[in-house]
Amino acid sequence: MNNILIEAKNLRKTYTDTVKKLEVLKGIDLEINREDLLVIQGPSGAGKSTLLHLLGGLDMPTKGSVFIDGIDIYGISDNNRANIRSQKIGFVFQFYNLLPEFTALENVFLPAFINRSLKFNKKYLRQEASDLLGMVKLSHRQFHRPYQLSGGELQRVAIARALMNDPEIIFCDEPTGNLDSKTGEEICELLLKLNKDNRKTIVIVTHEQKIASLAKRVIHIRDGQLFNNN
C-alpha cells in the first residue's frame, strides 16, 4: 500500500473580482502520509484555510491537482467528490458549524444521512452517535441543543460528528481558536489521541503552539507558498 494518502501538485487558487485578482495559493506541492499529524501554520491571510479547504475537496482550485488515495478529486464529478468527502474525510471548524435546532446526538449522526455507502438504520446510527459522544465525554449532554453547551462541549460535538462515518482523514481549521487555554489543551489531547490510538490522519490549521509542538510534522505557509517543511 502506498503510504502517501494525500498529495497536492502545483495547487493554485486565485479569486477574481471586477477590479483585481487575488492570488491566494501560488503553486503548492505537498505530500501527507497515512496516520500523519500535520500542522499548517502561518500569518493571517497566508492561505492556510484555503489550502485546507482545497485538500478536503470543499473548494475548486484555479489550477493543480489533489489526490486522495491516488484519486484526483478535482478530476471527477461533483457527486463522486462528495462521496469521497463523506466516506473518507471529517471536518472540524473553529465555529463548530452545528445545526442549532438539532440536539448534540442528532448533529453527530447527521453525516451518515449523506454517506451513500452506509445502509441507513436510524437505531444503529443513533447508537453509533451516542457511542461517539461517550468517547468525547459528552454522554450526559447528548440531548442538549448547541445553545445549551459551552464552547468546549460544542467542539467535542463537532469532533464526534467528524468521526461519524469513521473517516480516515480529519481536517481541522483552528479547532481551539474560540476556546480558553485549558479547554483548548483538552481538545489538543483529544486530537492527539485520535491520531495515536485511532490511527487517524489529521491535518490542523492552527496558531496553537502546543499542537505544533506535539505534531509529527509542521509546515509553514506565507504569501501562498510553503517556505519551510520539516
Image (tube, grey):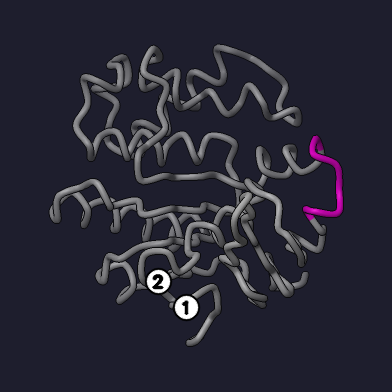
Q: Which residues are magenta?
A: 73-79
Main SS of the magenta part reads loop
Label 2 to label 1: alpha-carbon separation: 6 Å
Residue 128 is a magenta residue: no
Report which residue position mark 2 lands on.
41
Instruction: Say which of 51 and 7 sits in front.
Output: 51
Using the rendered view, name the quadrant where residue 90 is placed: top right
Q: Is residue 157 left or right of residue 80?
A: left
Please tell me which residue is depicted at 64% across the width and 54% down the height of the picture.
16
Q: Amino acid at mark 1?
A: Ile
**Residue 119 % position (x, y):** 72, 21
Image quadrant containing the N terminus: bottom right
Which residue occupies 32% across, 39% down? 156
Q: Are marks 2 and 1 in contact (CB under 8 Å)?
A: yes
Mark 1 crowd level (few <14, some 14–19, many ≥20, 10 Å Cα): some
At x 43%, y 63%, the residue is 196
Which comes before the other along the chain, label 2 or label 1?
Answer: 2
Seen as rendered, the residue at the extreme right is 76
Question: On the picture, is 172 further left or further right than 64?
Answer: left
154 is higher (above) or lower (below) than 170: above
Residue 72 image-quadrant placement: bottom right
Label 2 SS: strand
Looking at the image, which is closer to me, 54 or 172?
54
**Residue drawn at the location 60% of the way across and 60% of the way down:** 20
Q: Can you give x and y, in whole percent of width and height, for residue 136 in the image?
A: 32, 39
Secondary element at image label 1: strand
Residue bearing the label numbered 1: 219
Figure disc tally = 2
Q: Where is residue 152 drawn, in percent x and y?
A: 23, 40
Left or right of 95 on screen, residue 52: right
Residue sitting nearer the eye, 119 or 21:
21
